[in-house]
Image (cartoon, grey):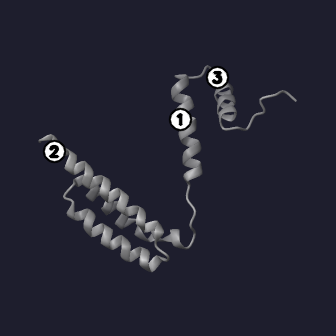
Amino acid sequence: MHLAQQALRTAKAWQCKELFKGFYEQPDAVQGQAFFHKWYRSAMRTRLDPVKKVAESFLKSLPRILTWFAHPISNAMAEGFNSAIQAIKSAARGFRNAEHYRIRILFHCGKLELMPS
């Protein structure tokens, strides 16, 4: 495969990802569903298996995805904390005991005072 063909496939996948962001800008579930089906058709036309796999997965989960319009909340904060914790774990390359790990997590996430009381 030529480099130009690889770049084109990457651009198609990126475009598909960026287009899906419009789903969350829809005013209600009805228009969200209509937007999703348009996006789904375009994703399936990309002929990129990874993109098609994600689109199929989203289609199976569509009723749960549409609950966003009734309850616009996400687990982004929890995922952010988890990412920070995983970074601490990776940077330390292991802790000698669980208490040191816990202290490092609490310190990094801002739950400990820097100055003694």
Q: Please give the residue where the numbered disc 1 appears in the rendered image.
A: 86
Residue 53 occupies quadrant:
bottom left
Residue lying at the far top of the rendered structure: 96
* Between 72 and 60, the one nearer to me in the picture: 72
Q: Going by the image, does 43 lie left or right of 78?
A: left
SS class of the residue under badge 1?
helix
The N terminus appears in which quarter of the rendering?
Answer: top left
For residue 115, side relative to residue 76 (left or right)? right
Would you call the spot at circle 3 few (<14 residues within 10 Å), some (14-19), or many (20 or more)? few
**Mark 3 vs 2, N-terminal side:** 2
Give the amino acid at mark 1. Answer: Gln
| Residue 64 drawn at (x, y percent) | 47, 67
Residue identifier under label 2: 4
Toward which corner of the image does residue 112 lie, by quadrant?
top right
Front of the two marks 3 and 1: 1
Q: Quadrant of residue 36?
A: bottom left
Q: Which residue is at the far right?
A: 117
Numbered label attached to residue 97: 3
Q: Is residue 85 above or below residue 41?
A: above
Q: How many marks?
A: 3
Say which residue appears at 53% left-offset and 33% top-offset.
87
Residue type, numbered disc 3: Asn
At 31% from the left and 72% from the top, the residue drawn is 38
